[in-house]
Structure formats: C-alpha cells, structure tokens
C-alpha cells in the first residue's frame, strides 16, 4: 500500500505538467516545448537522487519499507528521463532521426545526456520480470549504472544551463554527497 502511495505521489509532477500543457496553472510559458523538456529532465534527476538516497536511509534506519522502494522509484526516474528524451526527439526535433543524431554528436551536453539515458535504459530493461535472475546476479553493476546515469544527468543539466542556476548547483552538491555517503557505506561493509 505504501509503495503504491509513493508511486501515485511520484506522478503528480507529470500530471501537473499535463495540466499546464492545457493552459492551467499558468501554462508552459513562451516556449512550451522547452518547458516540457526542462521539467521532465529536472524531475528525472530528482527521482534519481531520491532513488540513490533510499539505500543509505535503509542502511542507517533499518526501516524495511526502504528495501522495497529503490526499484519502483528508479522506474519512475526512468519514466521521466524517457519522457525527457522523447519530448526532445519527437517534439523538439520532430522525430527526424538524422537531425537527432547530428544534434547529439555536435552538442557535448547531449552526448552526456544520451550516455546517461542509455545507462538507465539498460537498468530499466533489466527490471522486467523475465530478466530478474540476471538483474539480481548483476545488482552491483546495475547500481553502478544508476549512479553513472545520475552523475551524467546532473552533468548534462549543469552543462546545458546558459547561466549556472541554483538547481544545477544543488543537484551537483546532492549527488556528490550521495556518492561520498555510498562510498563510506561500501567501505564499512567491505571492512566487516
């Protein structure tokens, strides 16, 4: 029940974005495509950070509810990053594969974003029930891919900002803190 409630709350930003797309709550502003791409990107990073925060919270609190949350919250992050990419590819670039490939190759922050997307795509595909045995055997690799995707996502966001905004700085600080926290936990586990 708790997991379902968390998932429902996780989709509220997406529901709000859809309402804004129809002109409610102030709409999407002068550049709606950019607003959609920006919002889905921001929320994908936020949910990646939340996903990575869950394991240390479980390690220190031992609350069993935290054991069940990384996968569903991670899939929510994948949902947002997939929407982020699809909005860029299908709306901003009108689905023109040639333009998309050239744009990614010529724009460094898009290369970084694409690499992060591919990391999450692998983890997302591996989470299907038919891949569960493989996923469980490669849990460390999957975790590493999620961390890599999160770092690349923050880097992508930081790099594409015309002016360094507070959101990008906060995300970079949070990601650095989570990586340090995770390394401390891994070191403690390895030493025991």
Image: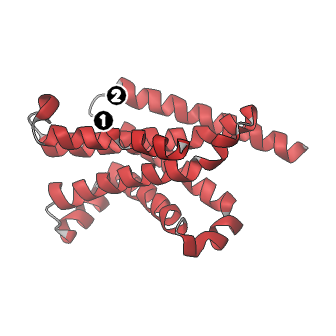
Residue placed under numbered mark 1 in the picture: 161
Q: Is residue 159 visible?
A: no
**Location of residue 52 by image quarter:** top right
**Label 1, label 2: how far apart the Cα atoms are:** 6 Å
The reply to whether callout 1 and callout 2 are in contact (CB within 8 Å) is yes
Question: Can you give x and y, in whole percent of width and height, for residue 162 in the image?
Answer: 26, 33
Res 164 label: 2
Residue 36 left/right relative to 131: left
Question: Can you give x and y, in whole percent of width and height, for residue 72 in the image?
Answer: 51, 52
Looking at the picture, tell me which residue is in the foreground, 159 or 27: 27
Question: Mark 1: which secondary structure?
Answer: loop
Res 5 label: none
What residue is shown at x 51% (from left), y 39% (from top)?
A: 49
Question: Can you give x and y, in whole percent of width and height, for residue 18 in the image?
Answer: 20, 44
Residue 91 left/right relative to 158: left
Looking at this rendering, what residue extends furthest in the top direction?
A: 166
Looking at this rendering, what residue extends furthest in the front direction?
A: 1
Seen in the picture, residue 157 relative to 110 is either above or below; the reply is above
Task: Tally the marks.
Answer: 2
Residue 41 left/right relative to 5: left
């Amino acid at each position: 029940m708790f997991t379902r409630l968390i998932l429902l709350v996780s989709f509220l930003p997406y529901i709000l974005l859809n309402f804004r797309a129809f002109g409610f709550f102030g709409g999407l502003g002068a550049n709606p495509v950019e607003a959609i791409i920006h919002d889905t990107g921001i929320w994908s990073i936020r949910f990646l950070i939340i996903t990575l925060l869950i394991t240390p919270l479980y390690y220190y609190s031992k609350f069993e509810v935290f054991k069940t949350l990384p996968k569903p919250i991670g899939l929510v992050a994948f949902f947002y990053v997939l929407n982020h990419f699809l909005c860029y590819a299908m709306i901003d670039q009108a689905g023109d594969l040639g333009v998309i490939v050239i744009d990614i190759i010529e724009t460094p922050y898009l290369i970084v974003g694409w690499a992060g997307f591919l990391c999450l795509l692998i983890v997302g595909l591996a989470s299907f029930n038919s891949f569960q045995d493989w996923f469980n055997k490669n849990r460390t690799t999957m975790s590493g891919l999620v961390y890599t995707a999160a770092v690349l996502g923050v880097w992508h966001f930081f790099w594409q900002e015309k002016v360094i905004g507070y959101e990008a700085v906060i995300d970079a600080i949070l990601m650095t803190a989570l990586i340090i926290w995770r390394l401390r936990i891994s070191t403690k586990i390895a030493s025991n």
